[in-house]
Structures are given as C-alpha cells and as structure tokens.
C-alpha cells in the first residue's frame, strides 16, 4: 500500500466535491501518511470469502477464560 | 454524609433523596452554588439553567412527598455533553454551525435517564463536533482542568470531565469514538466508562463515526457508572445496532470481590515511552489489584499499530461523510483544526475504508485469542498526565495530527475493536495531576471491568479526592 501524494489527494478531493488547494492537500498527505504506513501490512491481504460483517459475529461469540 | 450535598456520589445522593434525608432542591442548590463558584475558571458548562433546575427539583420534591417516585434517580440533578438531543432545547454540539439548533427528538440514553427522574442542570461544553482529544474549542473557549486550570481536560467530553471532577454534577454523559470519555476521565481524575459498540443506543446522539461511536457516563466511581449503565443499556427500536437480550446486574457486579480473577498487562505498546509518573502509577495499581486477590499476568497484544491505522481510516472517512455537506457549504464556520481533521478523510479511498472495516472481525478474533487467559486487561489511558492548554494548542498546524495521535495512542485500538473500557483514577503525579488506568474487557462484558474498578476503588481513595478552587 502506498501513501497518496498531495497531488493524488487533491484529485480525490475534487472528485468528492470538497476541493482543497495544493497546500491543504500537502497537509492531508502529511497527516494521513502514518495511517497508510500502519495499515500497509493488512492492505491487500484479506481473504476473498471473509464475511464483511464478521465483526458482529466475533463480538457475539462467547470467549472463555 | 458530607455537609455539602454536591460532594456526595451519585449512588449516595439518589438514596438520600429517595430516603428524604435531603431534598432535590437542597442538592440542586448545592450543585448550582458550586457551578457559580467554579464556572468562571473552568468554562465547563455550555448552558446553566438555574431557575428551571430549581423548579424541576421542587416538582420532584412535591412528587416524592405524595409518594410518587419517577425512578432510581428521582430528583438527582445532572448535566450532559451538549450533543445529546433533548427535544425543545438548543444542542450546539460544541459548534458554530449548530449554535441555534433546536432538537425535535430526545436521545434514547438521555430519555432513559430522564425517565429515571433526573433534573436538568444545563449542558456541558465539548470539543467541536466531538472531534478532538484535548478540550480546546475555538468557538466557546477551552475547558479547564480543575486540578490545575492551566491544564487541558482532555476531550472531546471536556465539560463532562471537568464538571464531574469539580463536583458540579454527580455524573455526565460523554461519548467515546477515539478516547473521548477515557481521556477526560484520566486527565481530570474521574471514572469514565466507554461501552461496547452496541451496548447503549446512539439514537439522538450527535454522530461522528457510525462504526465507532459509543455512549457512556463519567462519574465519581465505578458504582455510579454501573448505576447509569443499567438504566441506559439495552435494545432500542430507534437504533438497530443496540443489541437485545438480558442485561447483567451491573450494581451487583460492583459488590463482588476480585479474588481469583486474572488481569493482563500488555508486554509492549501500552507500556512503551511512558512518563515516569505514569509508569510508577501503573506499577502501584498492579500492586493494589494483587493485594485484592487478582493474579497479574503479562499478555502480548497483536498488531496495535495496524489497529490504530485502521481506526484512523474508519474514523476520518465516516466523519468526512457525515460532514460533507457542511464542508462544502459552511467550511468557514468550522474551527481550523476540526476542518483540517475532517478533510483528512478525503485521502482514504472507498476500497481502503472497506478493507479497514472488513479487517475488524479478524482483528477482534486475534485480540480475543490473545486475552483468552485473562478476565480483563489493564493499561494506561495515555502516556502522560494533562499537558498545558498552551502547549497542546496546535490548531491546524501540519504536525497537529501527530500531537493528536500521541494523546490517543492507547485509546484508538480499543475503539476499533469496539471493546468496553473503564478509566479509573489510580494516582497523582508529583505535581498533583491525576492519572488514570483503563480496564479493558471482552465485548459486552462491562460487568467485569466495573467489578474490578469498584474493587480497586474500595481499596483506594483516588476517586474520592476533590480539587480545591484556585
């Protein structure tokens, strides 16, 4: 997973309809960079058949000590 | 009993009013006197409704005289974070955008407390749209910490933490999406309960992130939080994410011993780079729990950095989606920091957001496997005690997000996993600032962390200490 650049973020913001200038796009890239680095080990690794609502299933499962 | 009714605990004052040893008017007047004394230095209240509160207290006393009791909190005055809709009242959400917004519905959690007989004192300050961990607010000013008024309260439930600590209200609703109950509880020296996602209805509570938002109380003690949770929890037709099923007896849980329980302490991440006072207080807390009969074991929790990142993806994206219309139409009415943080959500693609959501199940399963041998975990809420308001006033500087991430480092993984967590006061720094630890339980097992928290509070008096006006 690669961090989006300021230029890419500017394009995404334009598409979303919430345009930002290049300076703000740079701030966003700087702020969100660590999150993209942190999630890199997970991104693109999830199995195809993983139930999207599995969180609720795991929440409801009894966990024994 | 203290001669000043406002200094009583929620549980004690509810009993005293029901037993007619003190009237609702006396209690409400006592709170209003303290509010008048403290508000100029704390800025904890958004609105103070003294006349209406006294009238409601008189009505509660009159009803009680006729044998009519509304519920477990009959005549108890409370104030809550100004994001809970209360029909007919202004709910600012700490913002300029909603400065004049009058709610047409009442939040389910708030309604359940009203049904129990509470008296409305007013509303409490908060971070703009609950999106910030420090307690700064560019529209209404920062809230101050009663233990040292140049220090932050933590956020976003800043007024709730400050007001409960100064004994201006017996308890207050907060909300916790990334740490917003636990951080003010830690910095202000009160008890705060972040509930499991799905435990308490969020209907009528201002949304920030539909996957992470939780409703919970700040109060003096675990026992007080248990009383409030028992009143608020459970299914709600207005919020399909609130789960049905029988509720545990939370008050009974707080009376149980912790002898024989096993409590885990993380081997890494939550114990790294701690301020020396926080590290000392963690050790002292573990020693108390051992003396009370618990066994302490070390537990390796997996993938904390990834959990933090996933939480940020989910929170920023959902917050940006909620606020998209105002970001287009009213960008100038946001504070600079909140607007900057809302814009951060524009960087996350739909695919990345959904990946972060899909990983939530496997991540919780991995956490459950890691904690299979313990009843609960204990860890610091934050690596430091309250910083000063000046040093944490980072506005929308390029490094603001890094400052925010450092403060919320120990809270966000718990939000992503949706787990319950109880922040309890566990000591003071050498400078006299409170420090809290969070007990983290299994999904929907608030009873266990309330039990451990109450046992700790029977053995210590940190939760009973009251700050003095400067």
Image (cartoon, grey):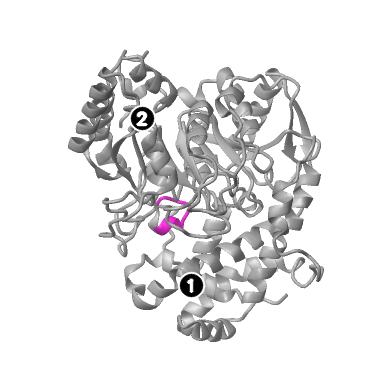
Q: Is residue B131 located in the magenta-colored stretch of the structure?
A: yes
Q: Residues within 10 Å of mark 1 (few under 14, many from 20)?
A: many
Viewer-proximal residue among B188 and B412: B412
Q: Position of residue B408 (x, y in %)?
A: 56, 52
Question: Can the viewer see residue B465 in this picture?
Answer: no
Query: What are the residue bounds of the magenta stretch?
Result: B129-135
Residue at screen point 62% across, 75% down: B350
Residue at screen point 77% across, 41% down: A63
Horizontal arrangement in the rendering, residue B283 relative to residue B156 (left or right)? right
Secondary structure under tag 2 reads loop
Viewer-proximal residue among B235 and A30: B235
**Mark 1 vs mark 2: which is more N-terminal?**
2
Q: Are marks 1 and 2 on the same chain?
A: yes
The residue identified by callout 2 is: B167
Q: Using the image, name the chain to which the residue with label 1 belongs.
A: B
Q: Is residue B442 located in the magenta-colored stretch of the structure?
A: no
The residue identified by callout 1 is: B343
């Amino acid at each position: 997973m690669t961090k989006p650049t300021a230029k890419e973020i500017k394009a995404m913001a334009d598409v979303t309809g919430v345009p930002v200038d290049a300076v703000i796009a740079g701030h966003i890239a700087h702020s969100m960079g660590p999150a993209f680095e942190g999630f890199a080990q997970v991104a693109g690794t999830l199995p195809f058949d993983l139930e999207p609502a599995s969180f609720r299933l795991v929440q409801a499962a009894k966990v024994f000590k | 009993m203290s001669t000043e009714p406002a200094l009583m605990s929620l549980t004690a004052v509810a009993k005293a009013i029901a037993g007619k040893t003190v009237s609702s008017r006396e209690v409400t007047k006592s709170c209003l006197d303290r509010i008048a004394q403290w508000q100029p230095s704390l800025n904890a209240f958004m609105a103070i409704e003294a006349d209406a509160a006294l009238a409601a207290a008189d009505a509660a006393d009159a009803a009680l005289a006729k044998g009519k009791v509304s519920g477990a909190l009959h005549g108890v005055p409370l104030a809550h974070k100004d994001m809970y809709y209360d029909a007919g009242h202004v709910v600012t959400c700490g913002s300029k955008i909603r400065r004049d917004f009058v709610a047409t519905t009442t939040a389910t959690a708030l309604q359940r407390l009203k049904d129990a007989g509470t008296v409305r004192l007013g509303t409490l300050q908060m971070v703009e749209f609950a999106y910030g961990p420090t307690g700064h607010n560019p529209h209404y000013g920062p809230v101050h910490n009663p233990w040292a008024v140049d220090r932050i309260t933590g956020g976003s439930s800043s007024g709730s933490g400050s007001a409960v600590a100064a004994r201006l209200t017996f308890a207050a609703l907060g909300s916790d999406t990334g740490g917003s109950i636990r951080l003010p509880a830690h910095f202000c020296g009160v008890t705060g309960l972040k509930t499991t996602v799905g435990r308490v209805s969020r209907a009528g509570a201002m949304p920030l992130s539909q996957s992470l938002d939780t409703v919970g109380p700040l109060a003096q003690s675990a026992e007080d939080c248990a009383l409030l949770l028992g009143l608020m929890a459970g299914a709600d037709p207005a919020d399909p994410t609130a789960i049905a099923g029988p509720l545990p007896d939370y008050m009974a849980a707080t009376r149980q011993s912790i002898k024989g329980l096993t409590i885990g302490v993380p081997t890494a991440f939550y114990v790294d780079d701690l301020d020396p006072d926080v590290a000392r207080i963690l050790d002292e807390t573990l020693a108390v729990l051992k003396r009370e009969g618990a066994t302490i074991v070390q537990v390796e929790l997996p993938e904390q950095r990834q959990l933090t990142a996933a939480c940020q993806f989910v929170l920023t994206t959902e917050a940006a989606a909620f606020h998209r219309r105002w970001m287009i139409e009213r960008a100038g009415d946001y504070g600079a920091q909140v607007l900057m943080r809302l814009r951060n959500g524009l960087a996350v693609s739909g695919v990345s957001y959904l990946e972060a959501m899909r990983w939530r199940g496997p991540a919780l399963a991995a956490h459950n496997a890691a904690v299979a041998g313990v009843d609960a975990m204990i860890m610091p809420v934050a690596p430091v005690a309250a910083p000063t308001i000046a040093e944490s006033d980072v506005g929308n500087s390029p490094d603001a997000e890094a400052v925010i991430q450092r403060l919320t480092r120990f809270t966000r993984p718990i939000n992503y996993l949706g787990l319950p967590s109880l922040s309890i006061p566990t000591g003071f720094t050498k400078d006299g600032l409170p420090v809290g630890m969070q007990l983290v339980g299994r999904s929907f097992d608030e009873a266990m962390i309330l039990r451990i928290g109450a046992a700790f509070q029977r053995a210590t008096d940190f939760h009973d200490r009251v700050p003095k006006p400067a």
